[in-house]
Image (cartoon, rainbow, N blue to C red):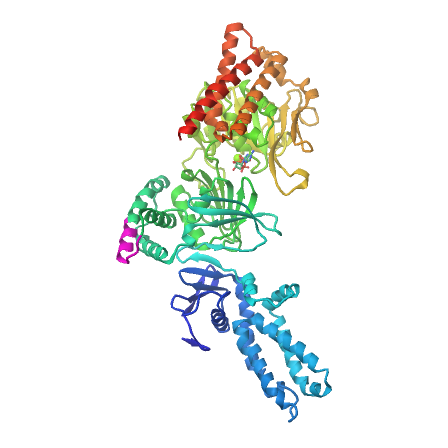
Amino acid sequence: MKIGNFEVGEYAVKESGGKRHLIFDCRNCVYSSSLTDDKACRYHVINILSQVEADLVVLAEVYERVFNKRQTKLLKEISELIPKFELENIWGVKNLGTEGSECEKFFGLRHDLLVKVSHELIGYDPILAYISLLSEIKTEKEKMQNEAYAACSKEYMNILLYLQTAFEETTLITEAKKILVKLEQMPDTKQLYYSFFEAQVKPSFIGSRLMFEKEESLELLDEYAVKKSSVQIFKHPNKLEKLYFLNPPEYTLPPEKYFVLSKTKEIVATYRPGRTSLSAIAKSRKYFERVYESTIVDISKQNSIDLSKEEVKELSEIVARYTVGYGILEILLGDRNLTDIYLDSPIGQRPLYVVHSDYGQCQTNILYTEDEAESMVSKLRAMSGRPFDEAHPVLDFDLQDLETRTAVIGKPLAPDGTAFAFRLHKMTPWTLAQFIDNKFITPLGAGLLSFFIDTQSTMLVTGSRGSGKTSLLGALVLEILQNTRIICQEDTLEIPVSYMKEIGFNIQRLKTRAPIGTAKNETEVSPQDALRTALRLGDSALVLGEVRSVEARVLYEAMRVGAAGNIVLGTIHGDSAYSVWDRVVNDLDVPSTSFKATDVVVVARPIRFGGSLERHRRLVQITEIKKEWITDPLHEGGLLDLMLFDASKDKLELMEDNLKESSLFDKINKTSGLSMTAMWDSIRMNSNSKSFMVELKNKLEFPELLEAENTVPATNKLMLLKQEQLEENGSVDYSDVLGKWKFWYKNEFVKRLLARRKKK
Ligand SMILES: Nc1ncnc2c1ncn2[C@@H]1O[C@H](COP(=O)(O)OP(=O)(O)OP(=O)(O)O)[C@@H](O)[C@H]1O
Ligand SMILES: [Mg+2]
């Protein structure tokens, strides 16, 4: 095909995701597939755009460069000017000046300039066309100081000004003008095109597009690798959130590898597993990778492409990612620095968002597509065996192989279509020592909570969404003595039970039906039935992932009559001790006085210090529920704060005056015989032992020290030393026990771990 003077590649318009894509096949084009660097390419695109309707422009070569709606509109507006100017006969004689022999000597140059600006240059370099126009206007105005010249120029000046207005009505020129006025020198227009036409790039067989902004003003904050992809975190001068840029190898492979990859993908697309169960996929993954490896070897041999063993393996992993895997999301799910991934509807309009444990909410450079979302939904539907349609617009599901909980919502609940939220669980449970280390809790607060568990109290952890309730619950479970049986009831499996079993806990898990989004004929047991069963399983500590509906009544009834075993722990949505009472009594229908079966409410909250944009999770309240009130605990002094957070000091403070009024400590005194002094000695011993672990971890730069596999045996030892003294002397000298424990911890335990680390 010939357009202007150029032989050019084919193009086609395809509709996808409700948008019209104008796709240029650049493989056989003699020009480079770049709107910014190649003016011939620009000319071609602008010309075709004046003839077809399109929302997006795609330049397809080895990779596809996609120009979004806004960028396409910039070009489209310019492209519409070309036929318009032609129709208006801009360079016709009537526009060249006043007719008459004197004036006609200027016509030649004027004609050439008008043709250049309104017909030729406008297609190759519209910004330069505009700049040339402005400079012509300027020179003409100067020349028109001369009266004789001015008499020849009225029509010409009018048409120049007309063109100026027409150019300035386009968005591209309006935007370019803003930049031009700031510049002192005439710029190379290429730089301007760079700022407008940064393309999103993607390999043709992958849906997701990546945006690579090369803005100099971005400040690199961090850089690391995840599954052979690089991750960069940037600070943008004008954005509140940080930028999270993912650069997976499949987006930048050299052409020959890319060729092998696309061919393999084509071939293996046929033997893709259908409704295979999740665990089968996880297991078969390795199997598929091996199959792909042999296909890759075949293809590379046939095409004389040399690939090393590692390269074959790398390519087969990529193919697996886009066939049996979760696509580009899989890389994100592999970044365990992330806590959440959000894909809002309508998909493809905004980039994907993530929450990073160090940098908070970040905007990514990934644009997911509807097609990918659909295939993700069918995968989730197949794996969960649950429905997802207009009658069941919520699908809650655990991706166990990825330690991730997903929630998908669809129409009509999400009117703009499917949206996803992924919560990445920490691979190992949080420990109180880690919470001390990251300032979530003070050592004394940790000691106090541990003491309440040791004395078999009933505790509820509350907080807003994502405040860290479940994480704190997990850390509290680790404080339960290992000679206690634990029953853990959850609807989404978040407490790392198998890990806890591995490190010696005696823990039984019950999985209950999720409260929303599931079909009526679901075989899972309802939370209230599961709880009744749990209560019958005998004397155990009871851990409830989340108390959220009718099971609350069963729970409180059991606690009230003392049938709920010794320790009861759970989480519940709320923001203070009072709101927990309100929720339990008014929403969940538990009689007000039954609420007294709760001993302690712990509140977690994200704090924005001094109104800062960053949020820091903090434990803000440890409140005792007293037993002498009747209808409203708040007004009748039934809520006694034992520790309260002071944001100005960033410290959880002990409310010493309140302690005297505590009935919980009285109760513990009656059941254990411990004096008040002994209780506080015990709390301080525990809290000091935890601080000691944190100090050593920081001194030795040895984060593993604070992992449960190491904190639990260390706490066990402390308990054993205490028990030894109790048996020998009938009483405990807490500071002596702590001294002995510290010696053991530093000189035996940590030494042994260090030696092991060296070997690795
Ligand atoms: N103290 C903390 N410091 C840093 N990250 C934390 C802390 N506590 C929790 N997180 C992380 O925050 C995320 C949310 O935590 P978690 O699931 O415990 O919150 P939640 O309050 O139970 O949320 P939900 O309301 O959804 O149940 C998790 O990824 C967790 O690892
Ligand atoms: Mg939770």
Write the residue at 40% across / 29% down. Answer: 759
Where 718 sits versus 232, above or below?
above
Which quadrant of the view contains residue 150?
Answer: bottom right
Ligand 1 lies in quarter: top right
Residue 681, given in percent of the width and then of the height, sits at: 60, 15
Write the residue at 61% across / 72% down. Answer: 131
Write the residue at 57% across / 71% down. Answer: 128
**Which is more toward the observer, 315 or 418?**
315
* Left or right: 168 as drawn, with respect to 25: right
Where 599 sits versus 391, above or below?
above
Where 313 sits versus 143, above or below?
above
Question: Would you say the magenta stretch is mainly helix, strand or loop?
Answer: helix
Instruction: Give the quarter of the figure containing the C terminus.
Output: top left
Range covered by the magenta-colored residues? 294-306
Count the marks: 0
Whether residue 521 is visible to the viewer of this picture, yes or no, is no
* Left or right: 425 as drawn, with respect to 640: left
Residue 740, given in percent of the width and then of the height, sits at: 52, 14
Instruction: Give the quarter of the figure containing the N terminus.
Output: bottom left
Q: Report the residue that reaches farthest toward the bottom.
A: 101
**Which is more toward the observer, 307 or 280?**
307
Residue 722 part of the magenta segment: no
Residue 480, given in percent of the width and then of the height, sits at: 50, 22
Residue 498, given in percent of the width and then of the height, sits at: 41, 29
Whether residue 33 is visible to the viewer of this picture, yes or no, is yes
